[in-house]
Image: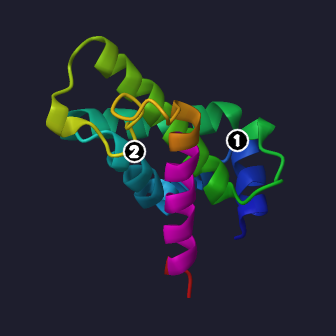
Amino acid sequence: MNDAQLVQQVLNGNNHAFRFLVSKYQRLVTHVVGRIIQQEDELEDICQEVFIKVFKTLKRFRGDSKLSTWIATIAYNTAITHYRKLKRRGELSYSEEPNLILAEKDPGLNQKSIEKEEAKKYLMQLIESLP
């Protein structure tokens, strides 16, 4: 079953298709979220949140990009949002800060460019892992 068929099955209410989608992309989501959130107890909750968002917004997926890219983007944005909340509440130690948060250390960099660079790195890793 290709991604377009999988999306259509989920949109038609097939619960088994959504379970298949989750199992197919679970490693991707865990990897993306895990690169930003280093707290193991938070990781699983955020991954679940990602798949809830995927389920709720799947009807908006237009197919302009691969489904994996779309899901990875949701995972990345969800993890960044969660990271910022943790940081604001002061719940992160210095050692838990991901490498992509360098803006405070180098005022010449802005957050958007850092996030863009991290996304590029991740996409290059995905491309290199292709057969």
Which residue corresponds to the image point at 20% horizontal and 37% vertical from the top-left?
A: 96
- In the image, residue 64 above or below residue 78: below
Span of residues in magenta: 115-128
Q: Secondary structure at mark 1?
A: loop
Q: Quadrant of residue 38?
A: top left
Instruction: Give the x, y percent position of residue 91.
Output: 20, 19
Residue 72 percent coordinates (x, y): 56, 50
* Residue 125 among magenta residues: yes
Q: Which residue is mark 1?
A: 13
38 or 15: nearer the viewer: 38
Specify whether residue 130 is painted magenta.
no
Could you tell me what secondary structure mostly forms the magenta stretch? helix
Q: Looking at numbered disc 2 in the image, what kind of residue is underneath it?
A: Val
Front in this rendered view, residue 44 or 103: 103
Residue for point 39% across, 22% down: 84
Dot 2, how many residues are within 10 Å of its Cα: few (below 14), some (14-19), or many (20+)?
A: many
Q: Which residue is mark 2?
A: 33
- Left or right: residue 83 compared with residue 89: right
Residue 129 in the image, given as x and y percentages of width and height: 49, 79
Give the position of the C terminus as an image quadrant: bottom right
